Image (tube, grey):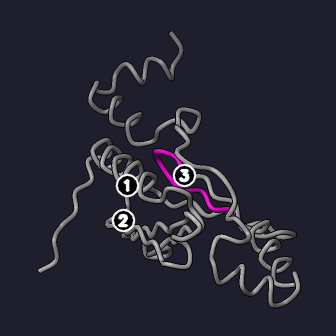
């Protein structure tokens, strides 16, 4: 038996189990949604694209290329940028509220928004736009948030 195996064997079983529960293997994540924001997810974007003879579409398309979102059962990974890339990780166990919005200009085209409100100080809110079937994704995220909070033993304290 190696030294590290002996040290692990000497730790209490609860300590060994809790260490693995808090930091799940990224390969074991289940993807709930992955994709880019559609360039023309809103009726207003269509109007602008038509009125500008396609120049608006080019702008919206460039914006959609600059944003990639992956929602898993543990976190939301948002990659932004075309030339300089930035990756933000939004941990689901920190989510306090989930709001599904379906503005008229998006709903007529079958799109919606998912707004995640977090306890994180740097990224208090994450708005995902241009989602097909936003209600279903919102339910999936809500269940994943509850599972993550239970796995990490996170409780939310109510404000007075």
Residue 50: percent from the left, percent from the top? Answer: 80, 84
Q: What residue sits right under mark 3 in the picture?
A: 71
Query: What residue is shown at x 11% (from left), y 80% (from top)?
Result: 160
Is mark 1 in CB contact (under 8 Å) with mark 3?
A: no
Tell which residue pokes out farthest to the left in this image.
160
Does 115 lie within the magenta span? no
Q: Gap in Å between the C-alphas at discs 1 and 2?
A: 12 Å
Which segment is the magenta one?
Answer: 71-79
Q: Gap in Å between the C-alphas at discs 3 and 2?
A: 14 Å
Mark earlier in primary sequence (3, 2): 3
Disc assigned to residue 98: 2
When asked about the image quadrant of residue 89, the answer is: bottom right
Q: Gap in Å between the C-alphas at discs 1 and 3?
A: 13 Å
Mark earlier in primary sequence (1, 2): 1
Disc assigned to residue 48: none
User: Could you say whether the residue bearing mark 1 is in a helix, strand or loop?
Assistant: helix
Disc assigned to residue 93: 1
């Amino acid at each position: 038996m190696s030294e590290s195996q002996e040290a692990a064997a000497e730790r209490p079983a609860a300590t060994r189990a809790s260490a693995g529960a808090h930091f799940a293997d990224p390969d074991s994540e289940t993807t709930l949604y992955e994709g880019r924001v559609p360039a023309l997810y809103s009726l207003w974007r269509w109007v602008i694209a038509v009125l500008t003879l396609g120049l608006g579409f080019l702008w919206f398309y460039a914006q959609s290329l600059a944003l990639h979102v992956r929602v898993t059962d543990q976190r939301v990974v948002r990659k932004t940028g075309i030339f300089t890339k930035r990756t933000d990780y939004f941990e689901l166990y920190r989510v306090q509220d989930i709001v599904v919005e379906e503005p008229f200009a998006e709903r007529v085209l079958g799109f919606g928004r998912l707004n995640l409100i977090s306890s994180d100080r740097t990224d208090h809110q994450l708005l995902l736009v241009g989602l097909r079937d936003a209600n279903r994704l919102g339910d999936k995220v809500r269940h994943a948030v509850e599972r993550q909070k239970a796995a990490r033993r996170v409780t939310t304290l109510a404000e007075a």
